[in-house]
Image: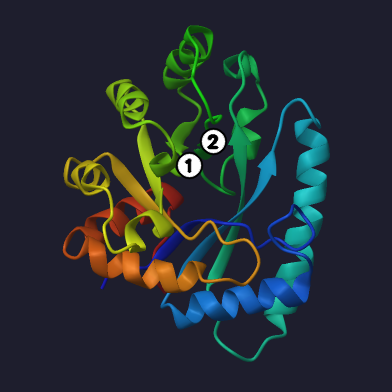
Amino acid sequence: MCPIIDFHAHILPGSDHGCRDVSMALRQLDLAAEAGVDLVLGVSHYYAHVESVEQFLQRRDRSFACLREEISGCRKALPEVIPGAEVLVCVGLEHMEELPALCAAGTDCLLLEMPFGTWNRRLMETMEALAERKDIRIVLAHVDRYQPEAVEELFCMGYEGQLNAEALAGALPRRTLLRWVQEGHICALGSDIHGTGKAYRDFRKAERRLGQELSAVMRHSAKLLGYQES
């Protein structure tokens, strides 16, 4: 069986608004385990206009160290956690030399968030330039949230996307999302969990909705993160 990977989870304690403290993070990981998740990419938001990469990494890594210590003393089986970042794109981001430091730990994979609203030409030029960088491999976060036509323009540039489970869990998921999966544009599924709500219930529903396509998506995620089941 292929590993089950949650590619987008805000479970790092006190690192952003997704998880209040270690006790909440452990509850989130309990829920992930109940959903059959093997690996979680634990991300925190990074905004270039708010803090430096160095400041972010210090904050994020302290949070991850606290969580790792608690997991090591936990008797129950919990998913493995890799620290990462959800980076908000901005004009000029293509020139940031430190971007590889924001990739999922031990990989060249960067989870990139697009802004809501209309994407102007200058921003799309930034995306074109980022697509040419050889030191990072970008995955677009929650592509289900944006206008399909704009997302497909990014797919044409060579980008791949992550879907939020919530978008697939409803009674009538958008056909466009399933088409993207079938066309190979989707490389990851994420809970995008904040707090301890229904994100992992949605994750299980999304797995069922993906059906036979789930294995291909999860294998792709595992390759991006260099994950091999023990």
Hey, which residue is sitting farthest front in the picture? 171
Quarter residue 74 falls in: bottom right
Dividing the image into 4 quarters, which one contains the C terminus?
bottom left
Give how far apart the Cα atoms at labels 1 and 2 are.
5 Å
Residue topped by disc 2: 113
Q: Is residue 57 left or right of residue 166?
A: right
Q: Would residue 2 be seen by someone viewing this image from the given angle?
A: no
Q: How is the image coloured?
A: rainbow
Hey, which residue is sitting farthest bottom in the picture? 75
Q: Is residue 137 left or right of residue 48?
A: left
Residue topped by disc 1: 141
Callout 2 secondary element: strand
Lower position in the chain sequence, tag 1 or tag 2: 2
Quarter residue 12 falls in: bottom right
Q: Is residue 115 above or below residue 86?
A: above
**For the point 65% across and 36% down, which residue is it?**
101
Q: Position of residue 124 (x, y in %)?
A: 46, 14
Q: Position of residue 78 (x, y in %)?
A: 56, 79
